[in-house]
């Protein structure tokens, strides 16, 4: 049964991926609606005209008069609600909403809701894997992968939803079973007036939540919650009551809950302190919705990470290989070098280079000197990188990714890791960072066993 009044007129504003999911949903519900987009040729226009030729669509500058004819506007996350035409419609009494608000009204199973400036995709994917391992019929999506409205189904037992601040702007009451804001740091400052406004948008995730999960290592992740609302926390310090953390015994570090050790961190394929934090966050969320520890830990042990994000590929001759092709800037490469380098017994052999986009590479020298055995350089700005790294470690130049993998394998010793973390964009040699990562993985797999 539809929860939408069929005698009222709606407008979907924005015809991208989420906008098209709104079109499909509203068409199934049998309600009257139209579509508007500020772009002359939005991404899904051809699909809309082919599959829903009866739906009115207006492209180009948004018309406040047209928008004001609706009782509710479903605004796509790519469009700021501060847009003048939207604000004018709101002044005239039109409700501004979005796909997540609509999803929350129709979802019949509990929702695990996850946001944060960083790591939300990894934690969302992990919780989904844990629920699957526990035998749950789980649907995973939102800002990651499948749009939320496309996930709705009667047989789903648990929804795991990643949410961006943009999606949360139009979410009035999510009513999640458990919600978390993993961390908050400056992002999207071109859309927000400052960090407080961004922080407020993120924290809309907690509206109506029955339980919350808080990062003890980030004060901005803690919501203002009423007494009695169950709160679970995670952090890289020691755990305590209702707390997930790290315990060390005989030199071995463990993921732990309260006073119980759960899993040695050495058994995780995702490495680095940031990923230990992600694992603890996922355990806290899964525990809050009643997932048993045994399948959650099994899922953790087999999780290799998201594609091209410090993703474990294979182990060969005591050396582990990681694809961090997504590290297209210096900051991302720094996080990978320091995170992985501090978490392995040996050293890193780093594969780096590409289109540096005018970046200053000097910040890489100190961590490379500390954590790396050697650096294999390729791509357009290889010499700029070489100049910044100086004599910190041996530097080798190669002409192809295949040659880079071969030389890195020759240099690495048992206990080491070979890490593709380019600190550069890929467009000088590849279509995108995904292609670069795929070709790296193929070259790693082709190494003789």
Image (tube, grey):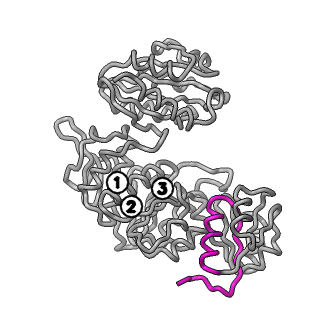
Q: Quadrant of residue 266?
A: top left
Secondary element under disc 3, as helix, strand or loop, is helix
Residue that mark 2 sits on: 213
Residue 44 drawn at (x, y percent): 70, 59
**Residue 358 as seen in the image, left or right of residue 353:** right
**Residue 222 visible in this rendered orientation of the protein:** yes
Residue range highlighted in magenta: 1-30
**Residue 371 visible in this rendered orientation of the protein:** no
Q: Which of disc 3 and disc 1 is earlier in sequence?
A: 3
**Residue 107 as seen in the image, left or right of residue 355:** left
Rounded to the nearest angstrom, the CA distance separating label 3 from label 2 is 12 Å
Q: Residue furthest bottom?
A: 7
Rounded to the nearest angstrom, the CA distance separating label 1 from label 3 is 14 Å
Residue 344 drawn at (x, y percent): 32, 30
Residue 264 in magenta stretch: no
Q: Residues within 10 Å of mark 2 (few under 14, many from 20)?
A: many
Residue that mark 1 sits on: 234
Query: Along the line of sight, which residue is nearer the eye, 126 or 348?
Result: 126
Q: Which of disc 2 and disc 3 is earlier in sequence?
A: 2
Residue that mark 3 sits on: 220
Query: Could you tell me which residue is drawn at 59 percent across and 49 percent down?
Result: 187
Q: Check the image and report above or below for 309 versus 76.
A: above
- Circles 2, 1 touching at the beta carbon (< 8 Å): yes
Query: Along the line of sight, which residue is nearer the eye, 111 or 217?
Result: 111
Residue 28 in magenta stretch: yes
Q: Check the image and report above or below for 66 versus 81.
A: below
- Circles 3, 2 touching at the beta carbon (< 8 Å): no
Secondary element under disc 1, as helix, strand or loop, is strand
């Amino acid at each position: 049964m539809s929860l939408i009044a069929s005698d009222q007129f709606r407008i979907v504003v924005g015809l991208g991926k989420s906008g098209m999911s709104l079109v499909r949903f509203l068409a199934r519900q049998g309600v009257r609606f139209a579509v508007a987009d500020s772009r002359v040729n939005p991404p899904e226009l051809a699909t809309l005209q082919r599959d829903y030729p009866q739906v009115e669509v207006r492209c180009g500058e948004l018309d406040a008069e047209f928008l004001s004819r609706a009782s509710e506007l479903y605004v796509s996350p790519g469009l700021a609600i501060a847009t003048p035409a939207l604000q004018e419609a709101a002044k005239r009494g039109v409700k501004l909403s979005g796909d997540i608000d609509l999803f929350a009204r129709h979802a019949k199973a509990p929702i695990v809701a996850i946001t944060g400036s960083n790591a939300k995709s990894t934690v969302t994917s992990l919780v989904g894997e844990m629920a699957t391992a526990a035998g749950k019929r789980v649907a995973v999506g939102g800002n990651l992968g499948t749009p939320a409205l496309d996930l709705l189904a009667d047989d789903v037992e648990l929804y795991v939803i990643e949410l961006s601040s943009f999606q949360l702007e139009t979410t009035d009451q999510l009513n999640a079973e458990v919600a978390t804001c993993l961390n908050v740091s400056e992002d999207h400052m071109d859309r927000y007036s400052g960090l407080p406004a961004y922080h407020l948008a993120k924290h809309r995730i907690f509206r109506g939540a029955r339980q919350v999960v808080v990062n003890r290592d980030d004060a901005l992740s803690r919501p203002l919650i009423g007494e009695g609302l169950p709160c679970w926390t995670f952090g890289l310090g020691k755990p305590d009551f209702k707390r997930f953390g790290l315990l060390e015994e005989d030199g071995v570090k463990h993921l732990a809950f309260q006073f119980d050790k759960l899993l040695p961190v050495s058994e995780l394929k995702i490495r680095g302190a940031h990923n230990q934090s992600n694992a603890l966050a996922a355990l806290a969320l899964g525990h809050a919705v009643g997932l048993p520890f045994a399948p959650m830990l099994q899922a953790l042990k087999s999780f290799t990470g998201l594609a091209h994000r410090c993703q474990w590929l294979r182990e060969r001759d005591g050396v582990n290989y990681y694809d961090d092709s997504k590290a297209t800037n210096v900051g991302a490469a720094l996080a990978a070098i320091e995170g992985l380098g501090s978490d392995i017994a040996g050293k890193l052999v780093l594969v780096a280079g590409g289109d540096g986009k005018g970046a200053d590479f000097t910040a890489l020298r100190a961590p490379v000197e500390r954590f790396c055995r050697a650096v294999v350089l390729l791509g357009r700005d290889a010499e700029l990188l070489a100049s910044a790294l100086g004599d910190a470690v041996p530097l080798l130049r190669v002409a192809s990714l295949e040659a880079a993998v071969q030389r890195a394998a020759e240099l690495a010793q048992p206990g080491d890791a070979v890490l593709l973390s380019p600190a550069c964009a890929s467009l000088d040699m590849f279509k995108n960072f995904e292609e670069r990562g795929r070709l790296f993985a193929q070259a790693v797999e082709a190494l003789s066993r």
